[in-house]
Image: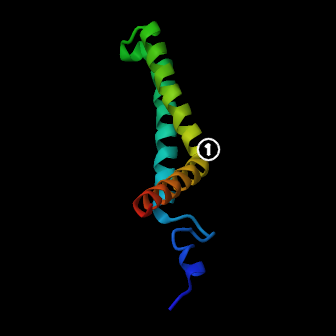
Amino acid sequence: MTNDASNSNLGAREPGPPAPTNRKAKLAIAVMALISLLIGFVLYVFADAFGIERRVATLIAIAFLVAGLADYLLLANWDRIGRLARSSSRNSSRNTSHDRDG
């Protein structure tokens, strides 16, 4: 059998290439960011052609630009957020097992 020291690292991820689901999530967020920026730009530039008032088109374009920026910030901090989530879930499971034992 294995010793306790090797069992303590079962939840830890070995360094290496990112998981396929992680890569797909990053790709989806990047695509959403680009699409949001593109829609915002197109709405702003072609507002008259779409029959949208300039003021309304500006507000809608800003909303899409903010959504694109939020997607970009999420993508830029994806690894940090993942580490925090894993750390939090590990601490939570330790506290839960400690409560059951004690």
Q: Residues within 10 Å of mark 1 (few under 14, many from 20)?
A: few
- Marks counted in the figure total 1
Query: On the rendered structure, is 53 left or right of 10?
Result: left
Q: Colour scheme in the image?
A: rainbow
Query: Residue 93, image x and y in percent?
Result: 46, 58
Name which residue type carries label 1: Ala
Give residue 76's quadrant in the image: top right
2 or 55, which is in the foreground?
A: 2
Q: Is residue 42 above or below residue 21?
A: above
Q: Residue at x 52, y 26 (%)?
A: 66
Query: Furthest residue to the bottom?
Result: 1
Q: Is residue 4 above or below residue 98?
A: below
Q: Secondary structure at mark 1?
A: helix
Residue at image x 45%, y 29%?
39
Residue 92 pos. (x, y %): 48, 53
Identify the residue at image location x=47%, y=22%: 63
User: Which residue is farthest front?
Assistant: 102
Q: Nearer the viewer, residue 16 or 32?
A: 16
Q: Position of residue 102 (x, y in %)?
A: 45, 60
- Residue wearing tag 1: 76
Which residue does the image show at 47% across and 33% down from the upper left?
36
> Residue 87: x and y, percent?
56, 54
Q: Quadrant location of residue 73?
A: top right
Vertically, is 60 above or below 93?
A: above
